[in-house]
Amino acid sequence: MALKLLINSLFRGGAEKQFAALSALLPAESILLLENEICQPADAAKIKTLSEHRAATSSALKTAAIPLYAHRLAKLAGPGDTVLSFMERANLVNVIAARRSGHRAVICERTRPSGEFSGLRGALMRPLIKRYYPRADLVVANSQGVKKDLADNFLVPAEKIKVINNGHDTAGIAAQARVPLDAAWARVYERPVLATSGRLTPAKGQWHLLRIFREVKKTLPEAALVLVGDGELKPWLLELSRELGFKTFSGEGAPPADADVYFTGFRENPYNFIAGAGLFVFTSLWEGFPNALTEAMACGIPVMSADCSSGPREILAPATPFFTRTNAPEKAPYGLLMPVLSGRRLAAARPEPEELAWAGEICAALADKKALEAYARAGLVRAGDFALSKTAALWKEIVTR
């Protein structure tokens, strides 16, 4: 009777960060990785890798290796064991292996598969999710929106899905947010700064933010935009930033004080880059339950977010139906909710109406210091609802039964 934790890898990412944090709080016998990639803190004595694949290994190869991973997992688990898995490939491996080993398969979905998987990747992954997820013993969704997506589009019985929101070390985030930036970065923050954080991926829609910022600069020419994070879209986003006429810093060396847009790259401590900003702006096109948003709130700054599926409304306006979507700026209790952007990659073309609305709301928000301070205070209180100490108790209930 043992608990084993399973994930694709411990690479840099929100799901991996959540998994690593939980692994320190749950009574797990072992931590199993499909790939040999470790960038998150975890108990090294418990870690066992099921392959020598790495983050750079072809996604197609790693998907094709699912039966091999499942075969190896089945040898490590047996009747009476519980295997808790995070992320899609690990979830599929967990369910497939359980058919052979007899262990209890508890899988956790961290995003909306309907948004995450499209094109060729979607043609491969969506049928696999629809086939195997309903066979899990229990499915954990990190938001009501993810639960609805799994039930409506992937045939997972609603009664088999439990919602547990992401949890954070809110006190630790606050402490890291107070760490002073070095002198060069501190000079950047002497100006009005907009900040965002997260992987530079299609889901996050950062190209919209660059186009919105062009409009903001017409009213606030002294403003700067700081993007914290790294990802596959970085080269294109850097090019777009320059096409939009911005003096752009790419994250190498000391930042100039007079750039318009700053790409920091990956940072071990992203929170002090966020905490100094006047407003956190989040343009995601879809989410599961956005860590970046709640972490920004824990840093003590006001937030503006797209009202995308799913997560932001559950965080910022929890008393409203989670499936509601705004088509106009909404002053929610814990932050500003904005209409979802189109997702079209229009490069340096003229702004879309929604982008103009975002720019206007950003300028208005930055001009209302009293309202921003009130949102910062309210957001900090709300972030406490997602303290890891609270969510960990819910996890312990389901994995120790």
Image (cartoon, rainbow, N blue to C red):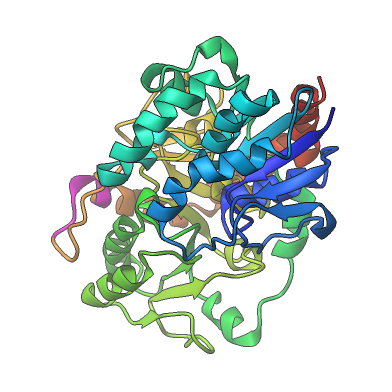
| Quarter location, residue 10 | bottom right
Residue 138: x and y in percent read 62, 21
Residue 93: x and y in percent read 55, 37
Question: Can I make out residue 205 in this image?
Answer: yes
State the residue in front, 79 or 378. 79
| Quarter location, residue 323 | top left
Residue name at image x 48 percent, y 25 percent = 132
Residue name at image x 44 percent, y 75 percent = 262
Direction from residue 76 to residue 146 in the image, left or right: left
| On screen, residue 258 above or below 158 | below
Direction from residue 393 to residue 282 in the image, left or right: left
Magenta-colored span: 350-355
> In the rendered structure, does residue 351 fall within the stretch colored magenta?
yes
State the residue in front, 175 or 85. 85
Residue name at image x 46 percent, y 57 percent = 366
> In the picture, which quadrant includes the C terminus?
top right
> In the rendered structure, does residue 202 fall within the stretch colored magenta?
no
| On screen, residue 134 above or below 256 | above
State the residue in front, 169 or 281. 169
> In the picture, which quadrant includes the N terminus?
top right
Direction from residue 132 to residue 295 in the image, left or right: right
| On screen, residue 13 above or below 262 | above
Residue name at image x 36 percent, y 33 percent = 126
Residue 28: x and y in percent read 82, 40
Question: As drawn, which residue projects farthest toward the left?
Answer: 349
The tally of labels here is 0
Question: Can I make out residue 142 in this image?
Answer: no
Residue 6: x and y in percent read 66, 42
Direction from residue 353 to residue 394 in the image, left or right: right
